[in-house]
Amino acid sequence: MSGTRARVEPAHIGLAAAAGVVFVWSAVRPHDYVTWFLEVAPAIIGFAVLAWTYHRFRLTMLAYSLCAVHAAILMVGGHYTYAEVPLFDWVRDVFGLARNDYDRVGHFAQGFVPAILAREVLLRRTPLARDKWLVTLVLAVALAISALYELFEWGVASATGSASDAFLGTQGDVWDTQKDMATCLVGAITSLALLSRVHDRALAGGKLSGLPPPVRD
């Protein structure tokens, strides 16, 4: 090993700082701290993983930006709980909806953001071409993440009983789990449809910490 490391990009520091500000806000007088921790834990774990891999497998700016947005969504949900985010209470009341749909935003992001992360890893670390198999695997990864999260929610609910109601945020919908996973899938499909070309340009022109270039078609 050379012992030298690529410098930390100022833009990446800015994203981390912005996420840190939202984290501090989220931690101040949340709805309750148990729910807050459960909702924010994925963002904390994700930040730790990104920090640990920063000099080993640096991602594109697009990927880091999406991660920061996803973290903010998680932290807002942790502060208020997903069923009680004020803006979406207002949306519910104005449009006569049956529930606060902020959790759908969270699950949409749960597919939208991991789709780009999975795509980046697969393109840079496997011989996969930009074809239907790449799309299939990316969607499978997004759905697997959603399924694992639903299993985690089930485990928390089984362990804590009624204390888990705010964390689950089902709002009385018996099909909430299935709708969450469907929303995640829609998010992943939307991400690939909207961002694949942008992501390809980022991979082609980005600074990737000396790692091998992405596999070409």
Image: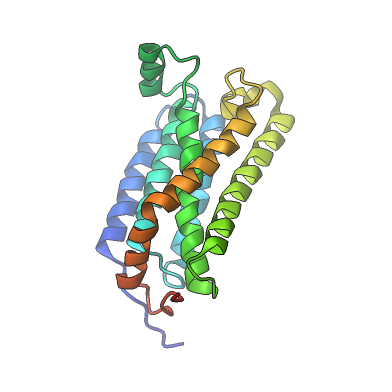
Query: In this view, which residue lies farthest toward the right?
Result: 158
27 or 174, nearer to the observer: 174
Answer yes or no: is residue 78 visible: no
Residue at the front extreme, as displayed: 132
Residue located 46% across and 38% down the image:
74
Q: Is residue 8 visible?
A: yes
Question: Going by the image, does 199 lie left or right of 106?
Answer: left
Which of the two residues, 39 or 169, is positioned nearer the viewer here?
169
Quadrant the C terminus occupies:
bottom left
x and y percent of residue 33 in the render? 52, 30
Q: Residue at x 50, y 71 (%)?
A: 129
Q: Nearer the viewer, residue 107 or 10?
A: 107
Residue at 74% from the left image edge and 31% from the top image edge = 158
In front of the other: 72 or 187: 187
- Residue found farthest to the bottom: 2
Give the left or right position of residue 30, taking residue 160 as reference: left
What x and y, as percent, mark residue 104? 49, 31
